[in-house]
Image (cartoon, helix red, strand yellow):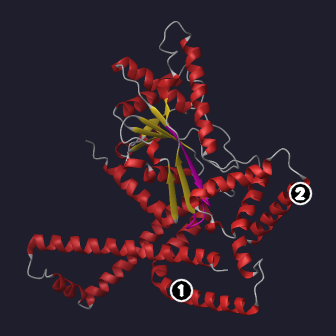
Amino acid sequence: MELKIVYRVLRKISDWSLGGFYSDVYIEGQENVTSDGPLIIASTHHNEIIDIVTLAATIPHRRYLSFWAKSSMFANPLARSIMLSSGAIPVKRNPNIGDGSVSGSGVSSQTSLFRESSMALAHGGVIGVFPEGTSYTLPTIMQVMSGTAWAAIDFVKWARDKNGLSKLTIVPVGIVYTDKARYQSRVYVRYGEPIVVESYMPEMFGGGADVQAVTKAIVKQLTAEMERQMWTMTINAPDWDTLYAAQMARDIIYEDPANVPLRDWLSVSQNLVDLFTTSSSSATLDAAKTALTTYYSLLHYTGISHSSLTFLLPIKSKPLFIRLLRTVRHVLFAFFSFVFFLPPMLLHIPAYIAAKFAAKAFAKEGEVETEAQFKVIFGGVGLGVGLGVGLGAALGCLRKYGGLELVWKLLGKTAQEGVLGRLKRIVIVLGAAYSSVYLLVRWHNALVYGMLVFPANNR
């Protein structure tokens, strides 16, 4: 049994990153992922490295995922060791380019990729791929390429020739972010219906057929089924105006995005998109779409959200006494929240600064997925620095004023010296540090989420 230490460490970091940056992750379709056997996870790819983090953290049964990675990352011996330990598979050539029947220099590279993928699958592994080929931010899925289907067919043929067994399943995955670059927004993950590859291939093994033509036809069928499922598991609009109109309609109906149950986010959003996309739209619907799009633009360029605006200027008018009472309540809530929020906030200041700076300095304008990626990565580094400094200062104060000795006395550890006693002390300190970090982060996130949701639920 492989230890896969690097993968375990990276997966734990993925757990922390996903649970720290986003407030809630809703997962559907876990029953579609088996606990063993060869499997290809074919996921949407709209949020750069965060999609990898999401899959690693949410895949049912905590199965190990191997991702395709550029072969140049394996050049250095140390880097190669780390990459292989993380389960990465080297890619020398984009498997989505061409029709699978490559020639020239592409033969060895693509054959090598499929051979490495087949070996991983043959050991009952899971390969994570992104059929769209690249990460992007658009109102709809633009392309689903054929590389995943070619890899699946290559494995089935290889396994059948080797040992007569050829069972392989592809599970499409849709990942939807309510606002992927916003701290404490939410994530909806859906694992789709399993696609049994062998059921598409009886003609290939029947004999007497044009194998190349049949293979290409099967690739088209598999790719079409993956695309169909990925479409049903994500929000797709024909253009930005339709998507923005649907977003504003949703925000107005629910008063705040936080009020939309995460399990219903996809269906609510897509139904509104379909409403504004209908070919038999009336003049009233067109006028509403134009007004909603204009409203969205005004809010976007002024940096105000609909929920904030309606909180200050509620649509539903209430008596003066009720409005005054509500204002007092919110002032008291803000005061006590700040008092309770101050200790963890001080430790999170480096995270705020690092995330903001990285997003501004490194993310390309208009690439929301890149902005989200840098916020998560540099925010995590900044948080580590803040918590390290804070815990170091706390430990120094305890040591200076005799607090540690008091702790040892309370735990009854003073009589035990030597190596064993020191090891026990180290374990206790590390356990206390981990527990403190966990509680501080949860404390901080709970208060942030509470301050985001409280106004929406107390208008």
Q: Does the magenta stretch include residue 150?
A: no
Is residue 459 shown above or below 40? Answer: below
- Distance from label 2 to label 1 (Cα)? 46 Å
Quadrant where the image shows the C terminus: bottom right
Task: Look at label 2 and name its amino acid.
Answer: Thr
Which mark, residue 338? 1
Quadrant where the image shows the N terminus: top left
SS at badge 1: helix
**Residue 90 appearing in the image:** yes
Q: Few, some or many C-alpha atoms within 10 Å of disc 2 (few <14, some 14-19, many ≥20)? A: few
Query: Residue at left 73%, top 48%?
Result: 237
Q: Is residue 361 left or right of residue 401?
A: right
Q: Which of 108 and 33 is in front in this view?
A: 33
Question: Farthest residue toward the top?
Answer: 208
Q: Is residue 42 left or right of residue 127?
A: right
Query: Residue at left 85%, top 59%?
Result: 290
Q: In this view, does 306 lie to the left or right of 89?
A: right
Q: Few, some or many C-alpha atoms within 10 Å of disc 1 (few <14, some 14-19, many ≥20)? A: some
Task: Look at label 1 and name its amino acid.
Answer: Phe
Q: Which of marks 2 and 1 is nearer the N terminus?
A: 2
Magenta span: 171-185
Residue 58 position, x and y percent, is 45, 52
Of tags 2 and 1, the one toward the viewer is 2
Is residue 279 shown above or below 427? Answer: above
Q: Is residue 175 magenta?
A: yes
Q: Name the residue under label 2.
A: 284
Q: Are marks 2 and 1 in contact (CB under 8 Å)?
A: no
Residue 57 position, x and y percent, is 43, 54
